Image (cartoon, rainbow, N blue to C red):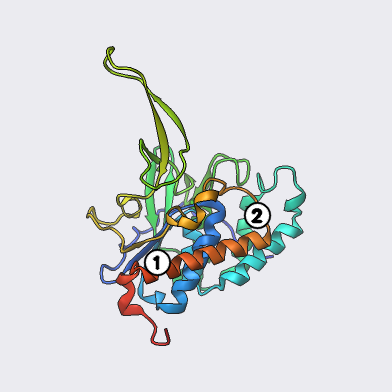
């Protein structure tokens, strides 16, 4: 297995902004729901020329867009991931992926990405990373090398302590954590129709008011243009043309908050199929109108 050294701490040139003439397709994070993203992209790739799009992503979403930009077959990537899990006896470990997930993701990327991966992703792919000390969310879309691309992806997926027992990842000399972190919002009523996450006790500001208990629901962590803002896109109402997240999939409502659990290979392929079917339904609803000019003739 090949190994590439980390990118230099030398300052990189500013990441170019995505071309405004291309439709923007974006994906947030989601742990194991990377495979849902993969199913969506598999559907889109069969019906649209995704080479005509700009791709934005954070965490698991960043992995998905990098693979599609490099032309990687997602079903093959699932087989590679499962083989690595079996070789490392993940299913026998008491803590499963905890502490070793980062190493496995890196080995997976090293095996899958072609030598010119950084050139295939240059300018077209935007990877969100969250720098710490101080906190600063940035979009990376210019890559010096294949190794530099991999380091950007590893920074974007770095969940503190979970991936390698370390609080931070290092990218170009800066400490970073998961690019989708610290963007979880809540609402005090069900905007999604899903079950409540937990109960929130709201302390009254007026002594005459009674203490109120609200049911709190998880709100789409990248609603209201958050992903566009984090990727450095202009501050405009519509910062991406197509925003795809498993949180919108009605078929996942009963299995919504277990996204970090270890799943079997059958579970992975099922999740891909769910993403594929969601994309099909969304296409029928007209959700991909922004890609109309890229539809393949054979479909």
Q: Quadrant of the C terminus?
A: bottom left
Seen at 74% across and 55% down, the residue is 88
Category of crowding for the residue at label 1, using alpha-carbon neighbours closer than 10 angstroms: few (below 14), some (14–19), many (at least 20): some
Count of labels in the image: 2
**Place of residue 296 in the rendered image (x, y in percent of width and height, measured from the top left):** 39, 83
Q: Is residue 100 shown to the viewer in this render?
A: yes
SS at badge 1 = helix
Seen at 38% across and 40% down, the residue is 185
Seen at 28% across and 12% down, the residue is 207
Taking the image as shown, residue 94 lies to the left or right of residue 255, namely: right
| Residue reaching furthest to the bottom | 298
Category of crowding for the residue at label 2, using alpha-carbon neighbours closer than 10 angstroms: few (below 14), some (14–19), many (at least 20): some
Instruction: Between residue 64 and residue 287, name the one nearer to us.
Output: 287
**Place of residue 93 in the rendered image (x, y in percent of width and height, measured from the top left):** 75, 46
**Place of residue 237 in the rendered image (x, y in percent of width and height, measured from the top left):** 23, 54
Which of the 4 image quadrants contains residue 77? bottom right
Q: Is residue 2 shown to the viewer in this render?
A: no
Taking the image as shown, residue 81 lies to the left or right of residue 122, namely: right
Q: Quadrant of the N terminus?
A: bottom right
| Residue reaching furthest to the left | 236
The residue that label 2 is drawn on is 263
Check residue 250 in the rendering and tell me which mark sits there, or answer none: none
Q: Earlier in the sequence, mark 2 or mark 1?
A: 2
Seen at 26% across and 71% down, the residue is 21
Would you place residue 103 above or below residue 48 in this image? above
**Place of residue 108 in the rendered image (x, y in percent of width and height, measured from the top left):** 62, 62
Instruction: Between residue 133 and residue 103, name the one nearer to us.
Output: 103
Taking the image as shown, residue 184 lies to the left or right of residue 67, namely: left
Q: Nearer the viewer, mark 2 or mark 1?
A: 1
The residue that label 1 is drawn on is 282
């Amino acid at each position: 297995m090949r190994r590439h050294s980390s990118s230099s701490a030398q300052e990189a040139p500013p990441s170019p902004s995505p071309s405004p003439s291309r439709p923007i397709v974006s994906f947030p994070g989601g742990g194991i729901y990377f495979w849902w993203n993969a199913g969506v992209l598999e559907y889109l790739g069969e019906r649209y020329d995704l080479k005509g799009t700009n791709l934005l992503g954070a965490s698991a979403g960043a992995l998905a867009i990098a693979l599609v930009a490099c032309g990687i077959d997602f079903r093959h990537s699932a087989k590679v991931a499962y083989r690595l899990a079996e070789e490392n006896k993940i299913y026998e470990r008491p803590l499963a992926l905890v502490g070793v997930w980062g190493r496995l993701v890196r080995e997976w990327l090293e095996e899958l990405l072609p030598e010119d991966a950084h050139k295939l992703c240059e300018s077209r792919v935007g990877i969100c990373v969250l720098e710490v000390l101080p906190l600063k969310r940035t979009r990376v879309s210019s890559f010096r090398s294949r190794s530099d691309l991999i380091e950007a992806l590893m920074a974007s997926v770095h969940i503190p302590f979970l991936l390698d027992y370390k609080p931070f990842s290092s990218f170009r000399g800066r400490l970073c954590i998961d690019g989708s972190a610290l963007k979880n919002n809540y609402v005090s009523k069900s905007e999604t129709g899903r079950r409540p996450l937990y109960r929130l006790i709201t302390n009254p500001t007026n002594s005459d008011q009674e203490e109120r208990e609200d049911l709190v629901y998880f709100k789409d962590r990248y609603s209201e243009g958050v992903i566009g803002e984090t990727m450095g896109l202009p501050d405009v109402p519509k910062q991406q043309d197509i925003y795809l997240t498993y949180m919108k999939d009605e078929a996942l409502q009963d299995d919504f908050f277990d996204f970090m659990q270890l799943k079997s290979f059958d579970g992975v392929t099922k999740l891909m199929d769910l993403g594929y079917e969601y994309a099909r339904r969304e296409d029928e609803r007209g959700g991909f109108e922004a890609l109309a000019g890229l539809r393949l003739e054979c479909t």
